[in-house]
Image (spheres, rainbow, N blue to C red):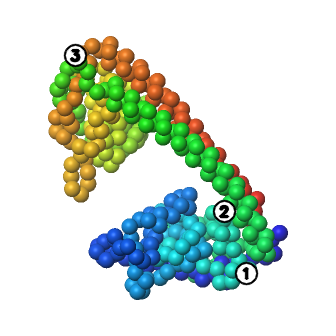
Amino acid sequence: MKEGWKQLGSIADIYNGDSINAEYKKTHFVGLEEGYPFIATKDVSPEGAVDYNNGVKIPADAGLKVAPSDSVFVCAEGGSAGKKIAYIEQEVCFGNKLFCIATKDKTKYSSKYIYYFCRSEKFRNQFFGELTGLIGGVSSKKFKGIECSFPHLSEQERIVSYLDAQFAKINALKTNTDKQLKEAQKLFQSALKEYLTPKEGWIKGCLGDFLNFRRGYDLTHAEMKEGDVPVAGSSGIIGYHNEATNISPCITVGRSGSVGKLNIYDKCWAHNTTLFVDDFKGNDPYFLAYLIQSLGVGSYSGGSAVPSLNRNYIHPIPTAVPFSKKEQRDIVVILDTLSEKVALLQKNYDQTITLCNDLKQSLLKSIFE
């Protein structure tokens, strides 16, 4: 099937786009009605979808590089290098971290075939083998030297048609699984609102009337090397404490970093990147965890440069709780049941995404190995 290997630079024009100052872009190119869409790395999804309607357009007389329709983009620098790859279906201008691959002779080489090659392990092995520099990048010269095997154009087109059909089926499975997960998440949020909206007989007050947020401890890495008590940071467990004593149970909320992210632990120490609650003032801690979640405390963050939470921002939030601890527990049981269903769907979604990605790579490997 494969008639020989060719370097990409020998069969295609390969060039990167332009860097535009953010303020200049905002002043001159945002909100224009006419012009080429400007595609930056952020406008390409990991799945290869391109946001052509991002609000940025470049006039034809601006002098920026243009990528033709039926070309391929590959991010060649930074965290998305070799990972964000797209097939371009209309003329666009584009950012300097993207390489455009525009075939020179469309009677011999299919751009869509090259797109699928760039998503294969065969391409990745060559690409990442040339990655250099602190931020990670591949030079134009080295990129042009990446090799691909090209059969006759008719065979390339047959392969593209086959992969298009198979990828469409896989994407439909992912879309359906994603839809189920989002519907379950939406149902859970509705239940959260329904069961935590103050009812007649509930005690009204501010959040600080029903619990007490504290700032986490300034633990060193040395203190987190041993022990079996988890240390909770803003995004989750970041280590273990070397003493048997612990805060139990404990609600943590990200103070900086993952601002507003909530977790509840049967036991833990709280790092200084979190606010934590261990004083529930007679209320059920698991009910309070759901209450905090429903209030969206992350939106109360302050700080112009780096958002952060302070308990003084959170304590005054108006709310209410059931007088009866039994009623609090009954609500927790209902929300726990729904939460477990969402977690199960999340697990199913994660497994499906992994399966779909593996299927795609298996298809590509069968073609390009």
**Residue picked out by circle 2:** 120
Instruction: Tell me, yes or no, if residue 287 can be seen here.
Output: yes
Residue lying at the far front of the rendered structure: 33
Which amino acid lies under the numbered mark 3 shown in the image of this protein?
Gly
**Residue picked out by circle 1:** 107
Q: Nearer the viewer, residue 67 or 346?
A: 67
**Residue 153 % position (x, y):** 76, 75
**Residue picked out by circle 3:** 201
Residue at 48% across, 35% down: 184
Residue at 61% across, 43% down: 352
In terms of image quadrants, where is residue 207? top left
**Residue 342 % position (x, y):** 49, 33
Mark 1, residues whose alpha carbon is within 10 Å: few (<14), some, or many (≥20)? Answer: few
Which amino acid lies under the numbered mark 1 shown in the image of this protein?
Thr
Q: Earlier in the sequence, mark 2 or mark 3?
A: 2
- What distance separates the C-alpha of mark 2 from that of mark 3? 62 Å
| Discs 1/2, front | 1
Which amino acid lies under the numbered mark 2 shown in the image of this protein?
Ser
Instruction: Tell me, yes or no, if residue 365 can be seen here.
Output: no
